[in-house]
Image: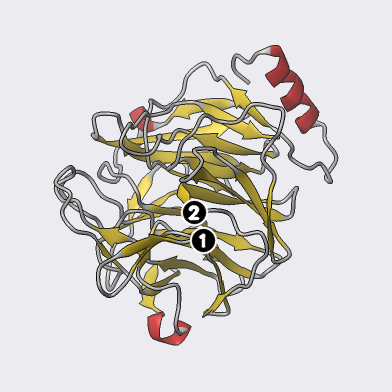
Amino acid sequence: MGTVDSPTRAALGEMATASPGHVATAWVQVTPPTSPSSRDQVQMGYDVRLKEVVLFGGYDPAVVPLGDTWVFHAGVWTNLTPNLTVSPPARWGAGFAYDPQQPAGMILFGGRNTTQFFNDTWLFNGTAWFNLTSGPAPSPRGAGVGLAYDAPDHALVLHGGGTGNVPSGSFSPWTRYNDTWAFVHGHWANRTRAAGPGPGSRSGMVAVYDPVLRGVLYFGGILQYPNGTTATMQDTWSFVHGVWKLLATRGSPPALYAPAITWDPTLKGAILFGENTSSGFDPTYEYRAGAWRNVSPVITASPATRGNVGLTFDKADGYLVLFGGDTPPPNYSYRSDTWAFV
């Protein structure tokens, strides 16, 4: 598993032998022999077929877009980039999700570099990248594209995202989007009209498939009103059988800076991580049965304050994996540490 201290080794050992009913209770730092460099807004997800976590790109502390590809398994990061002849252009803030349709693999959509936004679609099958771009597609966008696989509808579902601050650092105005698209067997279809009134024009929504809900769960993001003003949202939406619904939930998380979400099958709930913009504390929240609950560890350490992290459940290893991210403005600090929620 790479180099880990005694408490880490003990915690991961207990986790590996835990019963199927084991419930995550603590964050444990993992220290592999090598890791991706410090970066923000990575694209990261779990490939069910490969049984590995896949990471692509992000941007470094100098705001240089990155285009490297890594996998994580059994506590070890492996850089696949030297063996790849083709890769997507370097970028950050894209949609990234596993698509079990043929051909199965991780699907990458959109994102940006310092001067442009993308609307290309790529597949990573574990050994190579393939450009699937063809026909109609959502417009170029980044800033956190809400993308997740909707199992009953056999489609990837995308909502929102935005464009702005071009070139990077210019602080040009943002435009956020209110459209909903489905990616089915290699083709995009606009489902905005059929889906009905939805979350509105927003970027930074986080999305995950909820097998209990049997639909995609969306949380938060930055909503842009018609007059151009914005608000950081704390609302929870579902997308079930192609229709949007605002969920009445209990115990909603506070407004969070650039959160991330994933499904934890051991908890049978969604796990949300991000920085509380009012307190500076990074809470860990669980969504289950219509309610949010703060499950932040009280005694053990947690990842240092950050947002824009990579977060996914590593099914093969049996724990959540968190990587990278940054502290919020104005004092950005970029991370390259790896944590497991065990």
How would you rate the neighbour count of disc 1 (Cα within 10 Å): few for under 14, some for 14-19, many for 20 or more? some
Q: Quadrant of the C terminus?
A: top right
Residue at 51 percent across and 45 percent down: it is: 276
Seen in the image, is 283 located left or right of residue 60? Answer: right
Q: Residue placed at 64% from the left, 26% from the top?
A: 301
Quadrant in which residue 314 is drawn: top right
Residue 102 shows in the view: no
Q: Which mark is residue 257?
A: none
**SS for dot 2:** loop
Which amino acid type corresponds to the residue marked 1 in the rendered image? Gln
- Assign the N terminus to one quadrant of the image: top right
The residues tagged by marks 1 and 2 sit, at their Cα atoms, a distance apart of 6 Å
Residue 316 sits above or below residue 255 on the image: above
In the picture, measured across the screen, residue 124 lies left or right of residue 243, that is left
In terms of depth relative to the viewer, which is nearer, 227 or 89?
227
> Residue under circle 2?
255
Residue at (56%, 25%) from the top-left corner? 76
Quarter occupied by residue 226: bottom left
- For the point 74% across and 55% down, the residue is 268
In the rendered image, the vertical position of residue 76 relative to residue 296, given as above or below: above
Image side of residue 58 versus residue 325, left or right: left
- Residue type pointed to by label 2: Ala
Q: Position of residue 193 (x, y in %)?
A: 39, 86
The coloring applied to the image is: secondary structure
Residue count near mark 2 (Cα–Cα under 10 Å), binned few <14, some 14–19, many ≥20: many
Q: Nearer the viewer, residue 150 or 130?
A: 150
How far across and how far down the image is residue 57, in percent? 35, 39
Residue bearing mark 1: 234
Badges 1 and 2: C-beta atoms under 8 Å apart?
yes
Q: Relative to 282, say whether 198 is above or below.
A: below
Residue 209 x/y as whole percent = 59, 62
